[in-house]
Image (spheres, rainbow, N blue to C red):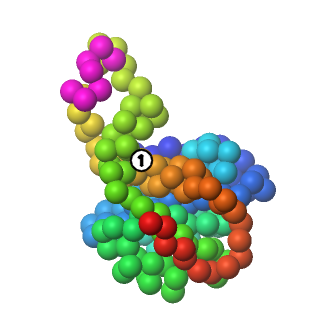
Amino acid sequence: MFYSADPSQAKSGQPMILGFDPGRDKCGVAVMGVDRRIHWHQVIRATEVINSVNALCETYAISLLVIGNQTTSEEWVQRLLSAIPPNLRITKIDERYSTLEARSRYWQIFPPQGLARFIPQELRSIRRPIDDIVAIVLIERYLDLPGVAVGSDERTHRINP
């Protein structure tokens, strides 16, 4: 399951951020503009990440990749640095409690329909992986950091506490 905005607006000139929730078998990937508009998100198999990231870089004006700093993140940073476009900067972001935050964010993106909207959020079940929503949360956390500058050409990663 994924969401994709109108592809004709993909290279709108606005800097885009690619969020990446690393995992061993599956990863969450999302693309968001600096205006916080979600353009694309999907849970993908780990074996397809590099091709997917490169395809997204061709489709969207991505200037930064934000990656969670927990599960397999060091391994993924090394793999990404060797395979992504050289102008794409990588930044690590604290992903503690991001899954809990993503559960709440899921219901904002996909509001319950019908009688389900009367069930308290904590009692509702999500019937799909939410790694892509975690990737959205990571981008939002990055954008909330003080002094964030998007669009740098440096190919370095900053580790945030």
Q: Residue at x 45, y 31 (%)?
A: 108
Quarter occupied by residue 128: top left
| Amino acid type, residue under disc 1 in the picture | Ile
Q: Residue at x 51, y 86 (%)?
A: 82
Q: Residue at x 42, y 47 (%)?
A: 133
Let me know if residue 52 appears in the view: no
Residue 23: % across, % down = 31, 66
- Left or right, 153 with respect to 119, comes to right
Which residue is nearer to you in this view: 47 or 67?
Answer: 67
Residue 96: % across, % down = 34, 57
Query: Is residue 21 within the magenta segment?
Result: no
Q: Which residues are magenta?
A: 117-123
Mark 1: few, some, or many residues within 10 Å (few <14, many ≥20)?
many
- Left or right, 154 with respect to 71, comes to right
Which residue is nearer to you in this view: 70 or 32?
Answer: 70
Which residue is nearer to you in this view: 151 or 62?
Answer: 151
Q: Secondary structure at mark 1?
A: helix
Magenta span dominant secondary structure: helix
Residue 72: % across, % down = 32, 73
The image quadrant where one finds the C terminus is bottom left
Q: Is residue 51 above or below residue 96?
A: below
Q: Which residue is mark 1?
A: 133
Let me know if residue 87 appears in the view: yes
